[in-house]
Image (cartoon, rainbow, N blue to C red):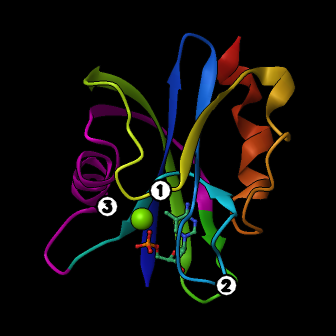
Amino acid sequence: MIVVGAAIIADGRLLAAQRAEPPALAGGWEFPGGKVDPGESDEQALVRECREELGVGVVLGDRVGGDWPLVLGGVLRVWTARLEDGEPRALEHRELRWLTAGELHDVPWLPGDRPIVDLLAPYLD
Ligand code: 9L3
Ligand code: MG
């Protein structure tokens, strides 16, 4: 399973999203995104997921690292992103937070997402 996630950055802050489900992951924080569907590119899937989950259009930037293993199986692929239209809303998440560089570890990231967070500090200057 390939899962894609967006590190959305605006005004020097990173968007973190708190999962609402499944019970094993609820309460953990993640890069918004989801599974790549058959016939979709990774990038197409990520743009679609940001529209579905947050109600925004995004423009993708750099790939952040490679294939990051997920605890429940599969790999996570992450891109930086900037907002093209709309303001993110928690349409499927429990809560959203914009984190400054100094706040990056103030939320309990999902284990699969946590190692990626440190690679984003240079983008928040
Ligand atoms: N997952 C982990 N970190 C992320 C995302 C977007 C997803 N940043 C995990 C949680 C689920 C699986 O990948 O087990 C599929 O995600 P989704 O389609 O339920 O969002
Ligand atoms: Mg999702």
- Asked whether residue 42 is drawn in magenta, I would say yes
Task: Identify the residue shown where x is 86% and y is 23%.
Answer: 102
Q: Position of residue 11 (x, y in %)?
A: 55, 10
Which residue, given by chain and number where applicable, does mark 1 sit on?
Answer: 93
Which residue, given by chain and number where applicable, does mark 3 sit on?
Answer: 42
Q: Is residue 118 left or right of residue 13?
A: right
Disc 2, ligand 1: is the CB inside 8 Å?
no
Q: Position of residue 109 (x, y in %)?
A: 75, 56
Q: CA distance from mark 2 to mark 3?
A: 25 Å
Task: Identify the residue shown where x is 73% and y is 21%.
Answer: 100
Q: Nearer the viewer, residue 36 or 92?
A: 92
> Which secondary structure lies at badge 2?
loop
Mark 2 or mark 3, earlier in chain: 2
Labelled pair 1, 2 in contact (Cβ < 8 Å): no
Mark 3 or mark 1, earlier in chain: 3
> Which secondary structure lies at badge 1?
loop
Which residue, given by chain and number where applicable, does mark 2 sit on?
Answer: 24
Which quadrant of the view contains residue 82? Answer: top left
Mark 1 or mark 2, earlier in chain: 2
**Tag 1: amino acid:** His
Q: Position of residue 110 (x, y in %)?
A: 72, 65
Mark 2 Cα shell of 10 Å, populated few (<14), some (14-19), many (≥20): few
